[in-house]
Amino acid sequence: MQAGISEGAFNQEVLESTTPVLVHFWAPWCGICRLIEPSLNLLLKQYGNRLKLVGINADENLKLASRYRITTLPTVLLFEGGQVLHRLDSYQRREELRSILQELLVAPARSR
């Protein structure tokens, strides 16, 4: 289960995190958002403590949604070191998500 955070906790939980963070922007009325959540949770289990997953209700956190130009839901952003590494603006199947994460999180050219 992903932790839900608000704007007040965003800096500490996401931007200052020592591990990569998947940020899932969602809304209660978004059916596709509910479809992607199980896939995100399975990925979190597979990556264990190498990845953190947080959810942000875009309706309740309009400043964050605006800051990251959220125009479609669900939107998933991968943060590391306070920076957005990758953005997924539409529903992705679990295998596509896993492939993207694998490429981004274990790329040998990246410095940690």
Image (cartoon, grey):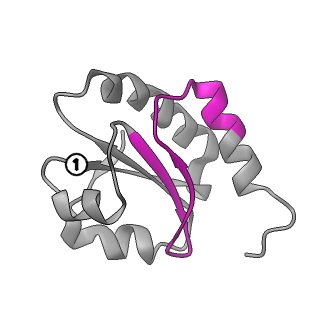
**Furthest-right residue in view?**
108
Choose between 61 and 70: the one closer to the eye: 70
Choose between 105 and 75: the one closer to the eye: 75
Dividing the image into 4 quarters, which one contains the N terminus?
Answer: top left
Is residue 103 one of those drawn in magenta?
Answer: no
For label 1, the SS is loop
Q: Is residue 81 left or right of residue 26?
A: right
Q: Residues within 10 Å of mark 1 (few under 14, many from 20)?
A: many
Q: Identify residue for label 1.
A: 58
Decide: is 93 above or below 64: above
Q: Is residue 55 left or right of residue 81?
A: left
- Residue 27 location, x and y as percent? 21, 37
- Residue 84 location, x and y as percent? 53, 64
Q: Is residue 52 left or right of residue 3?
A: right
Decide: is 85 above or below 92: below
Dividing the image into 4 quarters, which one contains the C terminus?
Answer: bottom right
Q: Which residues are magenta?
A: 75-99
- Residue 107 location, x and y as percent? 81, 58
